[in-house]
């Protein structure tokens, strides 16, 4: 049993993700702790990397610039579509998520940023792209 987090550790921890201005996005503090298997995709890899090497029982706060967190906002990942080319065009709403299937079978999710009667502007950036992030963790145990 290790007392520091490794890349393949199974952890019990509390974590909190917030924007740099401390707008909370998700938190397990004050609730049941999370159990996560690192490397399995349960937590974003950019956040997992910060857990490696942390000791059990230490509460740590990481302040991450956008390029250290979910990347910079890329305007090339914003795309206009004819509304009729999208699924359920009559039911579309701003800030709705739409899933697209690529020819090779992969799925991509886009966020509707703008909507007119004929067009939709869809953003394929990560929702936290371009934002500085505060990532707070307390590793309770390594299983």
Image: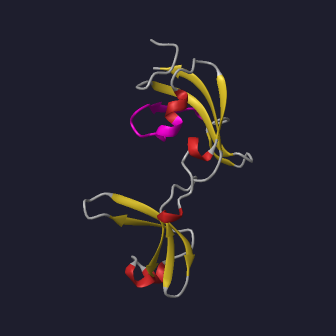
Towards the viewer: 31 or 14? 14
In the picture as drawn, the residue positioned furthest to the bottom comes out as: 117
- Residue 14 vertical placement versus 131 (above, below): above
Image quarter where the N terminus lies is top left
Image quarter where the C terminus lies is top left
Is residue 74 shown to the viewer in this render? yes
Residue 38 falls left or right of residue 61: left
Residue 141: x and y, percent? 53, 20
Q: At x 39% / y 60%, what residue is drawn?
A: 108
- Residue 132 vertical placement versus 111 (above, below): above
Is residue 43 shown to the viewer in this render? no
Residue 11 falls left or right of residue 57: left
Residue 21: x and y, percent? 74, 48
Residue 57 lies within the magenta run:
no
Residue 37 lies within the magenta run:
yes
Instruction: State the colouring used for the structure image.
Output: secondary structure
Towards the viewer: 58 or 72? 72
Residue 68: x and y, percent? 57, 41
Q: At x 40% / y 33%, what residue is drawn?
A: 39
Towards the viewer: 111 or 35? 111
Residue 79: x and y, percent? 47, 71
Q: At x 64% / y 20%, what residue is drawn?
A: 58
- Residue 88 vertical placement versus 59 (above, below): below
> The magenta stretch spans which residues?
32-47
- Number of numbered markers: 0
In the picture as drawn, the residue positioned furthest to the right comes out as: 21
In the picture as drawn, the residue positioned furthest to the left comes out as: 104
- Residue 130 vertical placement versus 100 (above, below): above
């Amino acid at each position: 049993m290790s007392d520091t987090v490794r890349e393949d550790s199974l952890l019990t921890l509390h974590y909190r993700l917030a924007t740099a201005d401390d707008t909370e996005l998700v938190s397990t503090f004050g609730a049941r702790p999370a159990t996560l298997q690192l490397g399995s995709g349960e937590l974003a890899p950019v956040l997992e990397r910060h857990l490696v090497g942390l000791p059990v029982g230490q509460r740590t706060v990481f302040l991450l610039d956008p390029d250290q967190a979910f990347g910079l906002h890329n305007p090339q990942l914003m795309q206009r579509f004819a509304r009729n080319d999208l699924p359920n065009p009559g039911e579309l709403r701003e800030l709705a998520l739409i899933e697209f299937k690529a020819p090779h079978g992969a799925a991509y999710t886009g966020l509707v940023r703008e909507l007119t009667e004929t067009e939709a502007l869809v953003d394929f950036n990560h929702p936290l792209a371009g934002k500085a992030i505060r990532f707070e963790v307390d590793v309770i145990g390594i299983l």
